[in-house]
Each structure stands twice: as C-alpha cells, then as structure tokens.
Image (cartoon, grey):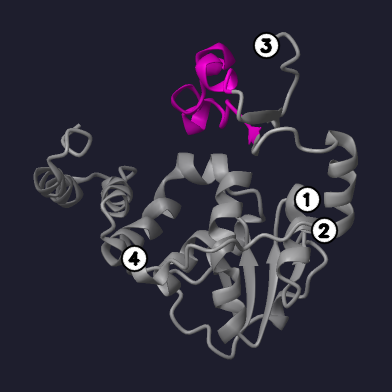
Amino acid sequence: ILDAAGRREEAVEAFDRAVDLQDVGENHAYGRGLGHLRHHAFAAGWADYEHRWRDANFVRTTWRHDRELLRRREAEPKDVAGRRVLLLGEQGVGDEIMFASMIPDLAAVAAKVVCVTNPRLRALFQASFPQVDFATDTRTMDLSAFDRIVPSGSLGALFRNAMEEFPGAPYLTPRPHAVARWMNRLGPRTTPLRVGLSWRGGVFSTGANGRSLDLSALAPLLERADCEFVSLQHGDVAAE
C-alpha cells in the first residue's frame, strides 16, 4: 500500500522489517524485490527476485519443468561467460517474451545456449535468435552437457542492472512466410496505423482481473479514423 501510494522509502523500510520477522513459508523478500524493480533499483530488485523460488504458490503456478531442474538451477547466476547454458523459460508467455530481450546478451558471452520455451514461441524465437537452439521439453536432453541451468527471469541480474543497459530496440523477427500469410489475410492497410489489440491477460492466480478490461471500454479508441484495429485476443470473443 505504501509503495502504491508513492511512499517508496517507507515501503522499503516496512518490507525490511517484514523480512526480518518473516516465518517459514512467508516470502516478503520477493515482494520487496518487485518494489525495487518498479522503481528501477535493479541490482537490489533482481537480488530479491531470486526469492520467487521460495514461494510455494509461485512455483506451483509458474514452473512447468521438472522439479529437479529447479533444484539444479544457478541460484545466483554470475559466471556464464564461456559456459554451456540451459536457459529455461518461466512464468507465462508474456513473461517469456519480455525476458527474451536478454537472450542476445547471453548468447554473446556463453559458449552455447539451449533455450526451453513454450511451444507457441519456438518458431518465433528461433527466427529471432538463430545463434541459439530452442526446444520445448527437457525429457530427452542430456543435462550433463550443460555447465549452467538458468531460469530466464534470472538473466536480469546479469544484464539489466541500470537503465542504460536496456537497449530499447526491437528484438523479435517474424518469419517472412508468416508476414506474407498475414499480409494476405489482412489485405492492404487503409489507415496510417494498423494496431493489434488484446484486452485480456493472465489467469486468476496471476491477477487477471487487474490486467483485463471490457472491450466496450475501448470504444473511444476504436472509433479513431486514423487507426485500423485487429483483434489478437485469444479465446472466443466473438460476442464482444
């Protein structure tokens, strides 16, 4: 509440006290880390972010790999230069896409990178990062072939500790035939902007209510004559 009210210093002090007093099963360090990240205190934020794996509910709802891989992960990945790295996508599709901005940073210093990702993202990621091998399952992998096992959210501590380390540049490259297929489906653009739109996200456990809205709420935007909107919303939204 203090953080949301803009009283950051008081919020950090409250989190610090909570961390000192927390019982087994409580995870106030993770919450403190999210607060740090919201305010661009990246080094402190990423350090606390590693406490996400101590939250049983977080692990239950976001970790889709074998639990043995979670136990073998690098708790604080630091030395990946020249190493063979198994990178594990974590959380939802949106999170994987966000953390993927650091895949080129990892590939630039590691000897080899194999990334396990959501099947829906594999083709896009392979086209975007040809220097990396992508898979959707670890069950047939020889894990002894890797020196480091790293969840993708842990890359922030390596490559995003200051605002100037965020390149602010596009990093996803669609396959040419996919672009051609969509151009054929949508036809020529008739307005200055063509905008893909999704108005719902997440599930109950990830705060879907706070990340979604009714399409009718966007009516003033949708009525703009200078934009053409294309629904990218997954699921059956025909009624809306």
Residue 97 higher or lower than 86, as above or below: above
Q: How far apart are marks 4 and 1 (CA)?
A: 31 Å
Give the x, y percent position of residue 189: 76, 37
Residues at marks 2 and 3, CA–CA distance in whole angstroms: 31 Å
Residue at image coords 79%, 61%: 139
List the residue tagged with mark 1. Answer: 119
Question: Could you classify mark 2 by the number of other residues whose Cα lies within 10 Å: few (under 14), some (14-19), or many (20 or more)?
Answer: some
Earlier sequence position, callout 3 versus callout 1: 1
Q: As drawn, is 116 to the left or to the right of 139? A: left
In this view, 59 is above or below 148 = above
Amino acid type, residue under disc 4 in the picture: Met
Residue under numbered circle 3 = 240
Residue type of the residue flagged with mark 2? Arg
SS category of the residue bearing label 4: helix
Q: Give the range drawn in magenta.
A: 196-224
Pointer 4: what residue?
A: 163
Quarter of the image holding residue 157?
A: bottom left
Q: In this view, does 98 lie above or below 80?
A: above
Please tell me whether residue 128 belongs to the stretch shown in magenta: no
Q: Which amino acid does label 3 sit on?
A: Glu
Question: Mark 3 and mark 1: span between their CA atoms?
Answer: 28 Å
Extreme residue in the bottom direction: 82
In this rendering, the label closer to the viewer, 4 or 1? 4
Q: Is mark 3 on a helix, strand or loop?
A: loop
